[in-house]
Image (spheres, grey):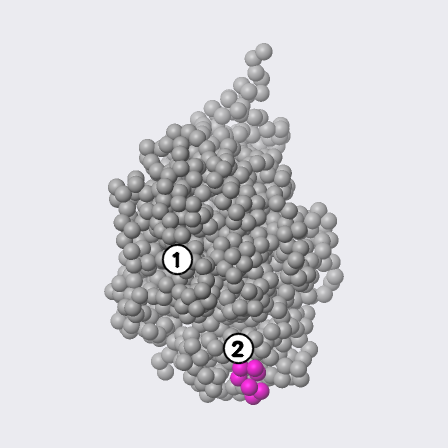
Amino acid sequence: MSIVITGIGTVGPHGVGTAALAAALADGTNAATELEPVPDFHSPSAHPRYLGRVDPAALAPHLDPRTSRRMSLPSRLAVVAARLARADAGLEAEHFEGHDVAVCLGTAFGPTDFTIRLLDQIRDKGPEAASPFLFMESVANAHAGQVALDAQLVGPNATIVQREASALSAVAQGVSYLASGRCELALVGAVDEIAPMTHGALERFGALSSGPCGRALDAARDGYAVSEGATVLVLERDDTAHARGARVLARVRTALRGNDPTASAVTWGDGAERLGLTLRLGLERAGLTPFAIDRVVSGASGSRRGDRLEALLLRQVLGDTPPSVLTPKAVTGEFGGGFLAAAVLAATGADFGPTPGFESVDPELGLRPHDGRPLERARTVLVSSLAAGGAAAWLVLEAGEA
Amino acid sequence: MIMRRAERPNNEMSKADTVHARIKRVIVESLMIEGLAPEEIGDEQALFGEGLGLDSVDALELVLGLENEFDIKVKSDQMDKSAFASVNTLAEFVERQKRAAEAVATPDE
Amino acid sequence: MSAPVHASASLAPPARVFVTGLGCVTPFGIGVEAFARGLASARAAFDDVTLFPSAGHRTRLAGEVRAELGPALADLAPRVKRHLSRTDAFAVLAAREALSDAALAPEDGEAGVFLGSSTGGMFEGEEFFWRLRATGGRARVSDIASQQHNGPADAVARAFGLHGPLVTMSSACSAASMAFEAALASLRAGETDVALAGGADGLCRLTYAGFNALRAVDEAPCRPFRADRAGLSLGEGAGLLVLETEAHARARGARVHGEFLGAGSSCDAHHMTAPKEDGSGLALAVEKALADARIGPADVDAVNAHGTATPLNDAAEWRGLTAVFGERVRELVFLPTKASIGHLLGAAGGAEAVASLLALRAGCATRVPGEGPLDPDCPARFADAAELPLAHDATILSVNLAFGGANAAVLLRGVRP
């Protein structure tokens, strides 16, 4: 059995819809803007701060106020991305009604802004003042529930939380539901907002880049840049996709998961060798060898330790001269699902321009991200994401119909 | 037991501000209903189901807003569904709660 | 689309999956035997909450884990103990017990981890946030390190050096049971041979005040399925199982506690907090679990109910189960675990699976704490006045319902001693 991607919807700092993101990837432009420090959350130091924000006005045409009245930002983002994905896949109500459609969304942080507002109410006015609305939307699975509610999707409704690996882990879980017959169709993806508290906490940890984009794989990289947004994909079995005449964007050859137990709770470990074995064994189970991989979409983001682990893992599995490595997080930022959308675009043969922020190869990493020259269309794309804390998730995507 | 909250000054409220008008404002503000002016809500208009389309969580949020606005404390078993039918029934409900609260605040010796 | 709901990839029966280890931390204390004793005592584990002030809430009660965690964690490596939230610690302690019970050494390292958690280290996150607000931003950065939802699963994988799939399922009150389902699918697909699965959640202000705001808490200890039930009681802890493919378990001669027969999940797509009144969303999850296990409703002997004791939940649950089991629903033995330990949210399904396997081991459903008349609208048969017998190899259905409309059902079968 083969599982295919038949629709994509994405919302992020580059705008609403796939075209805006594709254009940014082709040009190699990052859309982060400056963020004013927020009292209590940011340190008083005066350096510039950046965030890839979603313009709320851009969401408005896609959501009527009645539907979104009680929704947190991540719920709004997820519902809009899911609507775009359904439309892109040509799915109508008839494809849902009486069918088992799963929702499987990854999130690194959940609805932090509503959580903070609720905690402020409790702190300032006592628990008597706690708002039922805010609580209802403060649970990490609220956005998955809202996506299901919006389109009456009665299949498994899952929310996966694994930091930087949340998006690919959620895709892997959706693939598992489909492959084991637990649903007929799945909406999978990732959503995140970056509340001031989250931004401030990542800054305190020294996780954030000093510039507007993370300098993926660069010798002078100093952290990643963060973004808000959502990406939702429509996954289905190839027989059902074929039966309804759906256009196939890409095939999911396999979805793999693992862990690096050398990681601490807050950063990446150094277990590239053992992670490499997990990845190689996974490829083998799918009937693939590393030689089949002719493009890599790497989760390298500009993180010191994260990019080091990623690069050593890729060289471990693919050798010292791997195929072209795309690092779309330099454009999309970390979190918010932009990376997942870029990975699918890579499999569909979209253009990728130069990697913003990259200047010189780190000798320890020995990997150079794509420089913008035209690439042949890839047949087999390895998508890799390693998370702080240890989680790992990979996809192998194959080009859809030419 | 109904407990009266600490006294709270009813500032910036004009005498002309009727209970009905205040309830309508609470509905729009606490339920975050965009694009609806308080005065557009009819006194008899159904709030739940087909009317404004509110549900059980809205009712809880609304009670919280009314508790704040009118300095009352509503027990769960007093949240009678019929009280939430319209602005009119809510106004009666609020008046009842206020009388009960005053009765507790000045108990018979 | 006209594919059947259950179009399995192959017609051959899927690999069988066994439960070979149990571990838990509950309000009764650390460990499975403390939980077994607590359940057998027919007393509830509720007391005044001490982690944070309960003033201003409709109740003061919670099923709090009072056992000291420090000494229990003493022998873990310093790098494992760093940045552990209470919830992470519950998960690590339960995992250690489950691995030891299964006689699996950490160097077996291939296992996957599938854990449900609804709030992870939210309690520590709140402490950090309070300090930020109180000091205008001067709080130690390490204080927030443990507040992540993925903390418990990550900590377990780190503590025992596990390389398999690492999955945190954060689907509110169905999280642990959905984690079981994810683990089962992974084991059957050959992604891993061994999985630590279940859930962990700690008490925090957010959920304590949140359920209070929804007027869903009872001032008194919760009373599932009783006529005068008035809401839930919150609890905390972790419940984990070692799940293993038949081939792997047999090859190493593992002792088997039971068989994990199947699982299914669904979404109400009806309301963000209230269950569908007719219970049809839950019924769909149960039907999917039965199909997954290749058994019928007649094969089920007992139900570890979600039974939160809110008026709405228990009635909806009864209607959903009636839709699947018909009149036989009155013969099923109900295990309302929450009457003893409260609602463990993302850990609920995990602790309830351990409770189910303990009932099968004991050969009976022990007396349920609390008293009061039964509800004619949901006349669940549970051990009220006296314990009820259960065969050691009986089949138990365990269900959970959650915010966002997520429903999950798992099926466990015991073994004869």
Task: Give the residue drawn at x 57%, y 48%.
Answer: C30
Write down the residue under mark 2. A277
Res. A93 mark: none
Left or right: A6 with respect to B103?
A: left
Question: How far across and how far down the image is residue C290, in percent?
Answer: 31, 55
Whether residue B52 is in magenta: the answer is no
Q: Which residues are magenta?
A: A315-321
Residue A189 placement: quadrant: bottom left
Chain under numbered label 1: C
Residue at mark 1: C260
Q: Amino acid at mark 1?
A: Phe
3D distance between C-alphas at marks 2 and 1: 29 Å
- Image mark count: 2
The answer to which quarter of the image holds residue C64 is top right
Asked if badge 2 and badge 1 are on a common chain, one would say no
Residue C53: image quadrant is top right
How dense is the environment of label 2, judged by Cα within 10 Å: few (below 14), some, or many (20 and up)?
Answer: some
Q: With respect to residue C100, does A303 lie above or below?
A: below
Q: Is residue A123 visible?
A: yes
Dot 2 falls on which chain? A
Coordinates of residue A257 in the picture (x, y in percent)? 49, 70
